[in-house]
Amino acid sequence: MNQGRNGRDLTLDVNGNHFALRTWGKESGRPVLALHGWLDNAASFELIAPELRNCFVVAPDLAGHGRSDHRRADSGYYLWEHADDMNALVECLGWKRFSVLGHSMGTGVASILAAMNRNIEHMVFIDGMGAPFTVDDGNTVEHLRKAQRLLRLALRTRLHGFSGPEEAQFNSLEMAINERRNSIDGSLSAEGARLLAMRDLLNLGHGYRWRHDPRLVLPEPLQLTERQACEFLQHITCPLQLMLGRQGLFAGSAFDKRKHALPPDTRVHWHDGGHHFHLDNPTTTLIEQLNVALATSDSGPQQRIVNQ
């Protein structure tokens, strides 16, 4: 087990923005950049990061998430912007070679980061297979129109989250945790929801509200097409391992839709559980697979295996 089990909170200015980081392990360990999913934050790795042997894990709250700065009103939260932030963050950390551990949307950020930075040794995706939100070819214009309509509607009507910063969204902590637990696929455990919520809540005294930018709940006007998302996956050149939940968002038809785009030496492992199985029930099997994946030599191609 890693020494320094308890995580540490740091801050770093990257690309002119303030980023909150959560770190585990000794700085002399193998560098691992951990990228969380949509509406999550660095607490997504709170249970597994301390178990990564001889690793120095850095998990940033992506822009607009958790305790990191929101982007300006004239900017957005595109995957390629997150990837550019992470490329600059790695440079600020002085990492020459590093690995990436991504969950959900974080795997989409990682797939683009891999195109920007060829110094990635290993990539491990947890219930994710690249960009989670895409548009079909030919639907870009209509998608942009819809996204703009939704944004104007949210601002005009002050929808949930778009109210003033002094207005509470929840009367109690438990109300906020329950909302977080029921988002996405509704399978998040109470402990997992509490970890994520506590890093993303502001106590106003008379109630609570989310720290994250409410614009995150709206679709970005220009999303990757499915073909573009697959192209980024296909061009990953470092060893890639997927840890997928049998009841997760990338089982069944979602996996079949993307599996053709996986690099030929990808290893795929299936685990019981939903989209956040790494936070709900980090089994010893998962931990051992992660340790093997992050410690494997780059000396040759890996045989592709699919355990389902």
Image (spheres, helix red, strand yellow):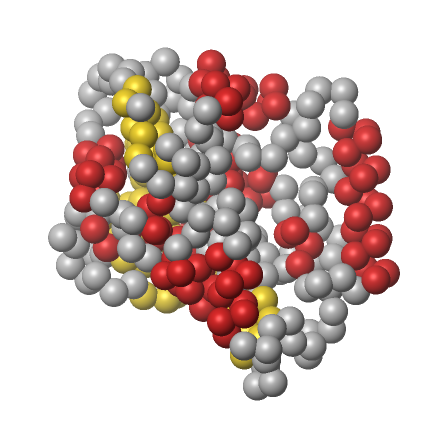
Q: Residue 303 sits in which quadrant?
A: top left
Q: Is residue 235 above or below residue 66?
A: above
Q: Is residue 72 left or right of residue 89?
A: right
Question: Residue 200: percent from the left, percent from the top?
Answer: 51, 65
Question: Residue 121: percent from the left, percent from the top?
Answer: 31, 32
Residue nearer the viewer, 304 or 298: 304
Q: Residue at 59%, 43% (x, y): give it.
A: 81
Q: Residue 139 sits in which quadrant?
A: top right
Question: Residue 20: percent from the left, percent from the top?
Answer: 46, 62
Task: Identify the image quadrant of the C terminus.
Answer: top left
Residue nearer the viewer, 301 or 268: 268
Q: Residue at 51%, 26% (x, y): give it.
A: 254
Q: Is residue 194 left or right of residue 229?
A: left
Query: Is there any visible trace of residue 278 in the rendered image?
Result: yes
Question: Residue 174: percent from the left, percent from the top?
Answer: 49, 71
Q: Residue at 61%, 19% (x, y): give it.
A: 227
Query: Is there any visible trace of residue 13 in the rendered image?
Result: no
Q: Residue 205 sits in which quadrant?
A: bottom right
Q: Is residue 252 above or below residue 96?
A: above
Farthest bottom residue in view: 205
Number of numbered callouts drawn = 0
Residue nearer the viewer, 28 or 308: 308
Q: Residue at 83%, 37% (x, y): give it.
A: 145
Q: Is residue 303 left or right of residue 108?
A: left
